[in-house]
Image (cartoon, rainbow, N blue to C red):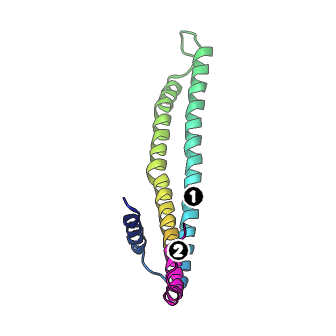
Amino acid sequence: MTSSQRQQFLEELLNQMPQLNSEQYQHYRQELDEKLARARSEEKSMRRIVAGAWGGTVALYIIVAVLCYRLKSPPSPFPDWFALVLAACVLLVPLAALLLLGLYLFKYRRKLSRTQAKAQQAALGELQRQLNELRAQLLPINKNQPPSPPQT
């Protein structure tokens, strides 16, 4: 891709952003920053919940392993209902932790990524607005001056 094609591509890319006046843009950026802060907060709390769920799963498996090792006697020292509850926990706790991990990855993490992408687009929009202002300031100056020879 040549430099003129790159320049044209960049200008087309930047021109895709809607033109906003400074007051509208400031309001938009403020809303976007609030959304980003909320998304980060939600993602962080959900990440802690998921880590706690997986930590609880590991702790449950360690406790069950220790109980089984210490109580090796052939007649079961536990009542039948307790063994049933323990088996259900061993099966259902990792499943719940896996579901929480899926929820975190597909809802909270995705929401944070989308909000960050919108914030990056807004930053590009701000750069475009600044470039347009600089162009508007430089065009009258360049029209009044004769073109300077290239410097080597």
* Callout 2 amino acid: Glu
Q: Nearer the viewer, mark 1 or mark 2?
A: 2
Q: How many marks?
A: 2
Look at 54% across and 60% down and name the residue there.
39
Q: Is label 2 in a helix, a strand or a loop? A: helix
Look at 44% across and 45% down and name the residue there.
102
- Residue 122 higher or lower than 57, as above or below: below
Q: Position of residue 143 (x, y in %)?
A: 48, 88
Report the residue marked by disc 1: 40
The rendered magenta stretch, by its main secondary structure, is classed as: helix
Badge 2 density bin: few <14, some 14–19, many ≥20, Cα 10 Å: many
Quadrant occupied by the N terminus: bottom left
Look at 59% across and 47% down and name the residue there.
48
> Residue 135 lies in magenta, yes or no?
yes
Out of 24 and 8, give the one closest to the viewer.
8
Out of 35 and 51, give the one closest to the viewer.
35
| Mark carried by residue 126 | 2
* Callout 1 amino acid: Arg
- Residue 59 higher or lower than 136, as above or below: above
> Residue 31 lies in magenta, yes or no?
no
Q: What segment carries the magenta color?
A: 128-152
